[in-house]
Structures are given as C-alpha cells and as structure tokens.
C-alpha cells in the first residue's frame, strides 16, 4: 500500500485484521475478494501459520492516514469494528512520566535540527547522534509554568486515548509501560505475553533505537531548581516525575484540577506489578 493513499491504508488494515492470511502480499490479497467481506462479522479463524504468534501494528490513533492527509480512523465507525473482531486487542504503549516526555521533546528538537530525524534507528542516524552528542545533551532552559501546562495536556491525552480505546473495544486496553521496558524489558514483555494468553515465554529483548534524553533531568534542564519551584506551585503532583532518575512507572496521571490513574483506565496496574 502506498504511503500517500490513506483510503487504501484504511482498507488494508481492515483486511489484515478481519481476515489474516499466511500470504498478505498486495497482489495475493487483491485476488482474494472474499477477504474484504469482513463487514459481515462472520468469524474467520487465523490460519495455522499464526499459531502461537502475535502480530502488532504501531498506530498513532490521532494521526491522519497517509500523505494525502486522509482523516484518522474514526473511533465509533472504524475502531469499534476493528477492536471487536475476534482475537484483536487494543494495546496502549504508555509513557507515564509526562514531565520527562515534555522535556525530551526539546532535546529531540535539537537532534532533529542536526540530523533531520526524531529517532536514532538507522546507522546514519546513530552516527549523526554521536557526532552531535554534546550539542544534543546540552541542558535546555525550560519555562516551569509552560511545562506544567504541557504536562497536563499530555495527561489528558492519555486519559482520552484509554477511554476511547476501552469504549471502542468493549474492555480496557492492555497497557505496556515505556519506563518498565527501560528498567526490565524481559519482565515487562513476559507480563505482556502472559496477559495475552501466550504463557510464560522466553523473551529476547532488544531495541534498534537509541534514547536521546537521559533519565536525570537535573542534568538535562539548565534551570532545574526554578522549574522545580514553578511545578510545585502549579501542580505538586508533577514533582515526583521531575525528580525521578530511575525510570519509575507512575500510576497517577496529573490533570488540571485533579488526578486520574492508568490502572483506572487500562488493564494493568503499575503498583500491582511492583513498579
């Protein structure tokens, strides 16, 4: 499917989830018109080649589809049908420390200015990161009040995403925690597989992407004490996230005017798993 055609991307995703086949190449798929009759809601068991396997799709639900800016999948019209298909489950990859996430965006902007990418995945991107590491790692000045506003918005986006995914799928989404993968990727992936009924499996965990921002914001934020004071005045709920240097998983979601929790909206509790 060409990246510029949002309508074809939508159709391809529906087909892949509703009627998986061992050979999903576009030419083969086009010849099998029956595979697109997923709207009939008839059960289509996965073929033997999928036995004991998980297949995942990394999708930003709020983003437009394709370069032609086709609208995102609609929660009521599209996601509800997709997430209620047999053997389909919504998984939210959650970054619980929204303060670090907001600060990291500033460092990623510096990385992008030098390397024209926001992720260090390819060999060229890694080499560029290494060449400009000093500039990228240089502490950034942060407006504490603005950071609180951005972090509140991030928290609200997490709640909205989990609520929408839960309503569309008819059950809370399964959560996988970014910080837990940093601390102990084998443990978090084994928990994930067990939650999906895959049993206790041996896990080989590796990532092709390099982390841009360090875990200790005292080294990443030039005016850390000022930011600490401003965050404390705006919302003390954020102070634990600002001070954390060990990739702690936070259950509490700090919102403007109150709090919520990942364990309230998703099928996983950070505290229950000792995070």
Image (cartoon, rainbow, N blue to C red):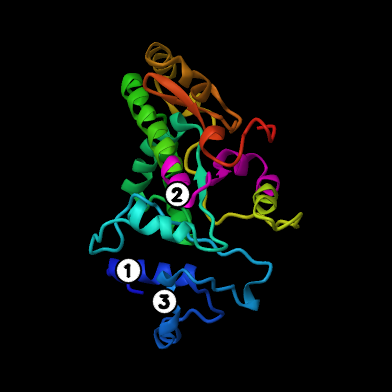
Q: Which dot, 3 or 2, sits closer to the camera? A: 3
Q: Earlier in the sequence, mark 3 or mark 2?
A: 3
Q: Main secondary structure of the magenta part?
A: helix
Crowding near pointer 2: few (<14 within 10 Å), some, many (20+)?
Answer: many
Please say if 182 is above or below 142.
Answer: below
Crowding near pointer 3: few (<14 within 10 Å), some, many (20+)?
Answer: few
At a point 50% along the width and 47% down the height, the residue shown is 92
C-beta proximity under 8 Å, tags 3 and 1: no
Q: Earlier in the sequence, mark 2 or mark 1?
A: 1
C-beta proximity under 8 Å, tags 2 and 1: no
Distance (Cα) linking label 2 and label 1: 27 Å
Judging by the rendered image, the residue that carries numbered circle 1 is 3
* Relative depth, front residue between 236 and 44: 44
Please say if 248 is above or below 127.
Answer: above
* Image spot of residue 130 (x, y percent): 48, 49
Judging by the rendered image, the residue that carries numbered circle 2 is 129
Answer whether residue 112 is visible to the viewer in this image.
yes
User: Where does the magenta region start and end?
Assistant: 163-188
* Relative depth, front residue between 96 and 53: 53
Q: Residue furthest bottom?
A: 31
Query: Which of the numbered marks, if any, corresponds to residue 32?
Result: none
Q: Earlier in the sequence, mark 3 or mark 1?
A: 1
**Is residue 165 one of those drawn in magenta?**
yes
Where does the N terminus fall, quadrant-wise? bottom left
* Relative depth, front residue between 58 and 35: 35
**Is residue 129 one of those drawn in magenta?**
no
Judging by the rendered image, the residue that carries numbered circle 3 is 37
Q: Which dot, 3 or 1, sits closer to the camera? A: 3
At a point 60% along the width and 42% down the height, the residue shown is 182
* Image spot of residue 180 (x, y percent): 62, 40
Crowding near pointer 1: few (<14 within 10 Å), some, many (20+)?
Answer: few
């Amino acid at each position: 499917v060409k990246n510029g055609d949002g309508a074809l991307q939508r159709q391809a995703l529906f087909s892949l989830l509703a009627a998986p086949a061992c050979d999903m190449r576009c030419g083969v798929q086009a010849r099998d018109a029956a595979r697109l009759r997923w709207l009939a809601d008839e059960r289509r068991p996965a073929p033997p080649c999928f036995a004991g396997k998980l297949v995942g799709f990394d999708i930003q639900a709020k983003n437009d589809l394709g370069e032609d800016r086709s609208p995102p999948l609609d929660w009521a019209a599209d996601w509800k049908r997709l997430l209620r298909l047999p053997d389909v489950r919504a998984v939210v990859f959650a970054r619980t420390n929204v303060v670090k996430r907001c600060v990291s965006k500033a460092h990623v902007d510096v990385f992008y200015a030098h390397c024209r990418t926001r992720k260090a995945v390819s060999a060229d991107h890694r080499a560029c990161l290494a060449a400009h590491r000093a500039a990228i790692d240089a502490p950034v000045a942060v407006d504490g009040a603005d950071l609180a506003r951005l972090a509140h918005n991030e928290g609200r986006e997490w709640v909205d995403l989990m609520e929408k995914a839960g309503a569309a799928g008819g059950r809370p989404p399964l959560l996988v925690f970014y910080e837990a993968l940093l601390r102990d990727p084998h443990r978090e992936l084994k928990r994930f597989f067990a939650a999906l009924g895959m049993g206790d499996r041996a896990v080989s965990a590796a990532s092709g992407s390099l982390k841009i921002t360090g875990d200790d914001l005292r080294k990443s934020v030039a005016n850390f004490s000022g930011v600490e004071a401003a965050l404390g005045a705006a919302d003390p709920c954020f102070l634990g996230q600002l001070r954390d240097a060990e990739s702690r998983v936070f259950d509490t979601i700090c919102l403007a005017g109150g709090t919520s929790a990942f364990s309230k909206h998703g099928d996983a509790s950070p505290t229950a798993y000792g995070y």
